[in-house]
């Protein structure tokens, strides 16, 4: 039996759970974000939470669209895309996030080095 993903019509995505992240606690990622408008005090908790939620969704090794990940995490699609890019960066773990075209102008992603 093929593995189901959230894109399958008969599988309802989980309800997004907004997690409270303690800025002094190191979770899956001790991420160091940057950018012209980045403010560590204002942005680190939010961005680290997004990164961890996206990672958790794609860590099953299955193919997922940005929209599917956004629905599962409760984060905006633009933030999901940014976190997929971040996961590929060395400072965020240099993860092997594979991209595949799926239909007209639509891509799906999976984490190749998922554990379990």
Image: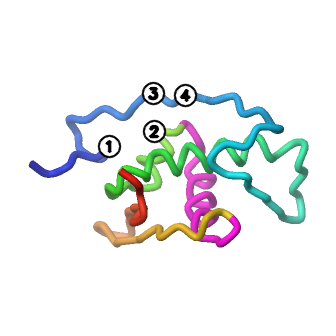
Disc 1 to disc 4, how far (Cα)? 16 Å
Side of 87 relative to 25 (left or right): left
Side of 67 relative to 5 (left or right): right
The disc label shown at residue 15, or none = 3
Side of 74 relative to 14 (left or right): right
Residue 80 on the magenta span: yes
Residue under numbered circle 1: 6
Q: Residue at x 61, y 65 (%)?
A: 93
Discs 2, 1 touching: Cβ within 8 Å: yes
Quarter of the rendering containing residue 41: top right
Q: Residue at x 45, y 46 (%)?
A: 57
**Upstream in sequence: badge 1 or badge 3:** 1
The residue lying toward the viewer, choosing from 22 and 104, is: 22
The disc label shown at residue 72, or none = 2
Q: Residues within 10 Å of mark 2 (few under 14, many from 20)?
A: many
Query: Magenta segment, principal secondary structure?
Result: helix
The magenta segment is 74-91
**Upstream in sequence: badge 2 or badge 4:** 4
In the rendered image, the vertical position of residue 47 relative to residue 32, given as above or below: above
């Amino acid at each position: 039996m093929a593995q189901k993903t959230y894109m399958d019509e008969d599988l309802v995505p989980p309800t997004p759970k907004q997690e409270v992240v303690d800025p002094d606690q190191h979770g899956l990622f001790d991420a160091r974000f940057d950018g012209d408008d980045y403010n560590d005090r204002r942005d680190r908790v939010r961005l680290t939470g997004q990164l961890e939620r996206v990672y958790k969704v794609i860590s099953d090794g299955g193919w997922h669209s940005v929209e599917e990940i956004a629905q599962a995490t409760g984060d905006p699609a633009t933030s999901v895309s940014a976190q997929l890019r971040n996961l590929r960066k060395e400072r965020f773990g240099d993860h092997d996030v594979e991209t595949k075209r799926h239909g007209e102008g639509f891509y799906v992603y999976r984490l190749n080095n998922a554990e379990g």
